[in-house]
Image (spheres, rainbow, N blue to C red):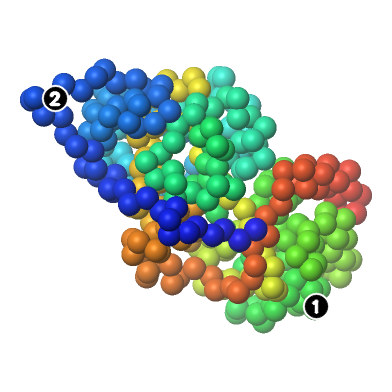
Amino acid sequence: MTVRISAAAVILTATIAGCGAPATENRQLPPAKPQAASLQEGFSTMDHLVETARKEGSLTVIGLPRDWVNYGEIIDAFSEEYGIKVDQLEPEASSRREIESAARLRPDVFDLSLEVAVANAAAFAPYKVQNWQDIPDELKDPAGRWYAGYGGYMSIGYDPGKVAAPTSYGDLLKPGYSVSLSGDPRQAASAFNGVMAASLSNGRAQAERGVEFFHRLKRAGNLAASEQAASVVLDWDYRNAGRAGWKVAIPGDAALSAYYVQAISKNAPHPAAARLWQEFLFSDRGQNLFLKGYARPARMEALRMRGALDGDLAARLPATNARPVMLTIPQTDAAKAYLQRAWGGKVG
C-alpha cells in the first residue's frame, strides 16, 4: 500500500516548542481537561498543556528499547525539553506483553504493532495531535485511539566482509550464506515479518511459502543458530541499518512494509504528560528523531513537502525502488495461525 498525502491534506502547524499562544493577563484560560481528545478541547494552548503535564511530574512508558528507532535520544530530548521524568518499564516487552501487563504496571502510553492496537482499541483514550491531518488515513483510527508514528521495510542485513550482496531472497539459499531471523517468528513481530517478506511473490505474501523457504534454508545448512553466528539477518531496515559495518538490501519490486502505532491508555496516571508525549513524537522534531534512528516517520511526505524533513538523515535510509506492501489484519492473523501450526515441524 503506497502512502500518498496530497498538498491539500497538509496543515501548516507550528512546531511543538512554544507553538501555543501564551495566556495573557487579560485572557483567563479555562481549566485544563487532561482527558480531552484534542489540544484545543483540553488545554487551549501548548503552554497550558506543558504546564499541566509538568504538574503531573512524570510519564510512564513501556516496551521502548533505547536502541530501537532512536528511542533513547527521543526520551532524553522529551525529558530535557519539558522537565518531565520518564519512567521506562520493560523495554524489551512485545506489543502483546505491553497490553497484558498494563493493568499491573499502568503505563501512560503504548507503542504497538497495528494488529495488537486494533484488537485493543477499547483500552485507549482518543486523542488527535495537532499534526493529525499529516498522518495518512490508512495509518490511523478515525476516532483517534491509535495512529502510526513510524515504520519501515523488511530487509536483508548482511556482512559484506563475509558474503556477496544478495539481489533476492533466493540468493540466500546459495552456499556461503548463514541466515537468521531476529527471534522466533511465532513470538517476535519482526521475525514473523521476516518470514512473510521472504514469501513475497508478485506482490503477495503467503505464510506457506515463507515457512517452506526457511525449511529449504535449514536443509541447505544456511540457517544460523543465532543472530551472532549469522552473516545475514532478516529484520526491519531501521534495525539492519544500525548494525556497524553491515549493509542493507531491499530486493525485488515489492517490499513488506509495516508501521508501529502510538496510543494513550484510558487509565493513564499522567494523562496530560501522555498527550504532551504524543505532541512531541508527532512534531517536526520528534519525527526527525525517528528518522535519525533510520525509521520512516508517519509524517514523512508532509515534512518533505514543507521542507521540514532533515535531508541528510533521509539520505541515509537504505535505498529501494520497491513498492511497499502492507499485510491486512486478517492476512496477519491467518499467517500467524499457520506459523503456530507449521513452524515447529518444518523448521524447528
Residue 343 lies left or right of residue 40; in this view the side is: right
Between marks 1 and 2 in the image, the one whose residue lies nearer the viewer: 2
Q: Position of residue 347 (x, y in %)?
A: 86, 55
Quarter of the image for the N terminus: give it.
bottom right
Residue 33 placement: quadrant: top left
Residue 55 lies left or right of residue 325; in this view the side is: left
Q: Amino acid at mark 1?
A: Lys
Closer to the N terminus: mark 1 or mark 2? 2
Q: Residue at x 37, y 69 (%)?
A: 311
Provide the secondary structure element on which disc 2 rests.
loop
Q: Position of residue 8 (x, y in %)?
A: 43, 56
Task: Spot the residue most to the front.
Answer: 8
Q: Position of residue 188 (x, y in %)?
A: 68, 46
Q: Identify the residue position indicated by label 2 in the image.
A: 27
Task: Spot the residue most to the left.
Answer: 25
Q: Identify the residue position indicated by label 1 in the image.
A: 174
Residue 99 placement: quadrant: top right
Provide the secondary structure element on which disc 1 rests.
loop
- The disc label shown at residue 57, or none: none
Viewer can see residue 53 = no
Q: Amino acid at mark 2?
A: Arg
74 relative to 101, above or below: below
97 relative to 289, above or below: above
| Dot 1 crowding, Cα within 10 Å, few <14, some 14–19, many 20+ | few
Residue 247 placement: quadrant: bottom right
174 relative to 106, above or below: below
Q: Residue at x 27, y 29 (%)?
A: 44
Q: Position of residue 156 (x, y in %)?
A: 65, 68
Q: Residue at x 40, y 24 (%)?
A: 36
187 or 296: which is nearer to us? Answer: 296
Task: Spot the residue most to the bottom.
Answer: 164
Disc 1 from disc 2: Cα separation: 72 Å
